[in-house]
Amino acid sequence: MKANTKAYGVVEVDERQKVTFPSGLFGFETLRDYVILDAERQPFYWLQSVESDKTAFVLINPFLFRPDYELDISDEDLRGIGITSPEKALVFAIVTIPRDGGPMTANLQGPIIINRDSRLGRQAILTDPRWKTRHNIVEEYARAGES
């Protein structure tokens, strides 16, 4: 299938790259179909809306810079997208890259959870006070490398 993307224009994508968020994402509830694309710079990915080429998010695996990251998500929320065991889940954090050159941050309070098999996803809200909406990726990655 073809997808019109914010970052790359029109690209060919495999059906396996498609992810459906039955409830949408917070603030984007009406957009439910997305594709995951590799970004030009690893370890980042694009989560591109299929319904709106202007809506895309940069994603990162939060465990890369926060190996101590813990998801406290109800079993009911996980069952809603068919996840019955942790190995079925892909976990991402949405990245913010400020235009003013400020630090690149990741939202660890609102992770994106995707079922590897069904390609259904949801955004969760974590209540653990350790996880904020703006974690400095570079600083935390450096600290993770030191330990």
Image (spheres, grey):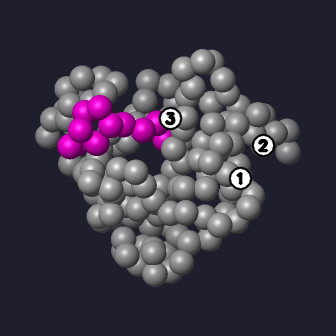
Q: Amino acid at mark 2?
A: Ala
- The kind of secondary structure element at disc 3 is strand
Position of residue 66 relative to residue 139, above or below, is: below
Residue that protrudes farthest toward the front in the picture: 27
Residue closer to the observer: 91 or 26: 26
Residue 55 drawn in magenta: yes
Numbered disc 1: secondary structure: loop
Label 2 vs label 3: CA separation? Answer: 18 Å
- Disc 3 packing (10 Å; few <14; some 14–19; many ≥20): some
How packed is label 2: few (under 14 Cα within 10 Å), some, or many (20 or more)?
some
Q: Is 98 above or below relative to 133? A: above
Q: Quick one: label 1, few (<14), some, or many (20+) residues within 10 Å?
A: few
Q: What kind of element bears circle 2?
A: helix
User: Residue 101's x, y, as percent?
Assistant: 63, 18
- Inspect the image, locate mark 3, and give the three-letter code of the amino acid beneath it: Phe
Real-space Cα separation, disc 1 to disc 2, in angstroms: 7 Å
Residue 32 vs residue 90, the one in the foreground: 32
How far across and down, in percent of the image, does residue 146 sit? 85, 39
What residue did someone put label 2 on? Answer: 144
The residue that label 1 is drawn on is: 67
**Residue located 36% across and 37% down the image:** 56
Instruction: Write down the residue under mark 3.
Output: 44
Q: Is residue 93 magenta?
A: no
Q: How far, Cα to Cα, is label 3 from label 1? A: 17 Å
User: What stretch of residues is rendered in magenta?
Assistant: 49-59
